[in-house]
Image (cartoon, helix red, strand yellow):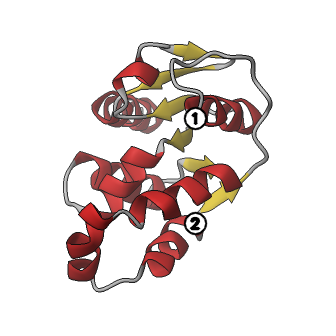
Amino acid sequence: MRLVLDTNVVVSALLWEGAPNRLLRICHTEGNLLFTSWPLLEELVKTLSKSKLEKKIDASLYSIDQLVDLYSKDVTVVRPFPVPRLAPAPDDDVVIGTAITAKADFIVTGDKPLLSVKVFEGGRIVSVSEALEAINQSASRNKQ
């Protein structure tokens, strides 16, 4: 499967245990392909730089740069396709544009307004739990 993770999912995956972290680990170990773009990596740095995350980042024993490097070493960076106003928030259009360029099956997000879009050219916008379910179903089909 080809996936684009929204920044909120990446932050959660890097800093906390739980479903986003499990999704990131599964993608890295089971051959699912992750895609991002420079604007999304810049947004990741900006988000990780927020003071409310400072203690969590310190506890991780990684710097912001190390966390971004950790994530970006196993993702393919693409140039987002320019899209017309699709998402409720203008910042989310770059997520959709990235997914279109990547020919992603899924955009994975925890952002309710982006989830409300539901589909984009060639794929669906899903929650972390929906992505994990789809990956599990795909893995089950491949084993049969």
Mark 1 or mark 2: name the one nearer the start of the chain.
2
Q: Is residue 84 above or below residue 91?
A: above
Q: Amino acid at mark 2?
A: Ser
Identify the element where label 1 is drawn.
loop
Q: Residue at x 59, y 58 (%)?
A: 41
Q: Amino acid at mark 1?
A: Asp
Left or right: 142 as drawn, with respect to 53: right
Residue 91: image tag: 1
Choose between 20 and 105: the one closer to the eye: 20
Image position, residue 106 (x, y; %): 53, 30
Choose between 41 and 119: the one closer to the eye: 41
Identify the element where label 2 is drawn.
helix
User: To which quarter of the image does residue 83 belong?
Assistant: top right
Residue to which mark 2 is pinned: 72
Quadrant in the picture for the C terminus: top left
Mark 1 or mark 2, whichever is nearer to me: 1
